[in-house]
Every structure is written in C-alpha cells, then in structure tokens.
Amino acid sequence: MQPEWWHWAVLGIGLIIAELAVPAFFVIWFGLGAVLVSLMLLAAPALSLTVQLLAWTFASVAMVALWFRIFKPGAHKTRIGMADAHVIGEAGILVRAVAPFEKGQVRFQKPLLGSEVWACIADEAIIAGERVKVLGVEGSFLKVGKP
C-alpha cells in the first residue's frame, strides 16, 4: 500500500499533538517532518515509499539537529558529572539541613545546570538557613561546606 499525502498529514498532526503529552520538546520535529513529506507528496504524488521514508527521516533529523545547534546551543554540554568547574565555588542557602549521613537541599539564587534547588551532602552538620559553598560534585549530589 502506498501512503497518500493525507496519511502523512494525519501522522504529522498526531505527532505534533502528542508533543503536548511529552515534555521533551522532541516529538514535534518528527511531526513537522511528516507534514513536510505530505507537502512533497502533494507536489509530486509519484514518490515511492522508500523516498518518502528517507525524506521523513532526513527532515526530522535535520530539524532536531538545527534545534540543538542553533536554538539550544550548549544544551547537550551541561552534564552534572562534567560540570565541576562551573559549579564549584557557587554559594547557596540550605533549605533542608544536611549532616554527614543525611542528604540536604541547597537553593541557589541563579539556576545551576538548569535547577535552582539541588540535593546536597556535607562532611559536617549544617542547619537549614545557613549559607554554604559548593566544594565538589559527587554523582548527582553537590558536596557543600561552610564558606
């Protein structure tokens, strides 16, 4: 069975609507790729299924690449384990007390790596409301201490 232009249009609109349920802002590019293929089929209805699938794949991947390269530069570079130099030395306020074997939470004035509040650990007990400084990154926790 050879898909017609409206099959691709329905698929594209469905994927664009599905983006409302997926918080990653990623599915929309595949939906727009399908809409682009439907427009191509309107202009040239004799395209084979192989060409349609290749066009959809190429358009979708190209739009994802453009999104990350132009509109969200650096989004793929900030990983907690690779960002030690960007985080160490930042000051924040403890919103939940921390002790040597208990996790706490620290809030920063400006977001660090996309979040204002981070789980933290410490070598000494520090009460909530105290000002702390980031000493290091251990896994997905920030190691903090008194400044």
Image: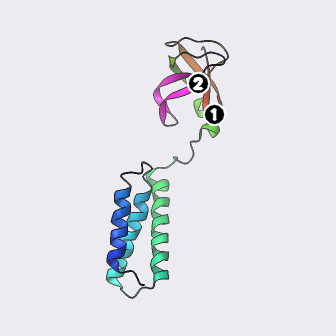
Q: Which residue is mark 2?
A: 120
Q: Is residue 101 magenta?
A: yes
Question: Quarter of the image holding residue 140?
Answer: top right
What's the magenta region?
98-120
Q: Hey, what amino acid is under mark 2? A: Cys
Looking at the image, the residue that sits furthest to the front is 1
Determine which quarter of the picture holds residue 63. bottom left
| Residue type at numbered disc 1 | Asp
Dot 1 alpha-carbon crowd within 10 angstroms: few under 14, some 14 to 19, many 20 or more? some
Q: Nearer the viewer, residue 107 or 53?
A: 53
User: Looking at the picture, does residue 50 appear above or below residue 74?
Assistant: below
* Number of numbered callouts drawn: 2
* Residue name at image x 54 percent, y 15 percent: 97
Does 130 appear above or below 72? Answer: above
N-terminal of the pair, mark 1 or mark 2, is: 1
Q: Main secondary structure of the magenta part?
A: strand
Work out which quarter of the rendered image holds the C terminus and state it. Answer: top right
Q: Position of residue 7 (x, y in %)?
A: 35, 75
Contact? badges 1 and 2 (CB < 8 Å): no
9 is within the stretch colored magenta: no
User: As drawn, is 100 to the left or to the right of 10?
Assistant: right
Q: Identify which residue is drawn at 51% across, 13% down.
A: 128
Q: Label 1, on which residue?
A: 84
Q: Position of residue 100 (x, y in %)?
A: 66, 17
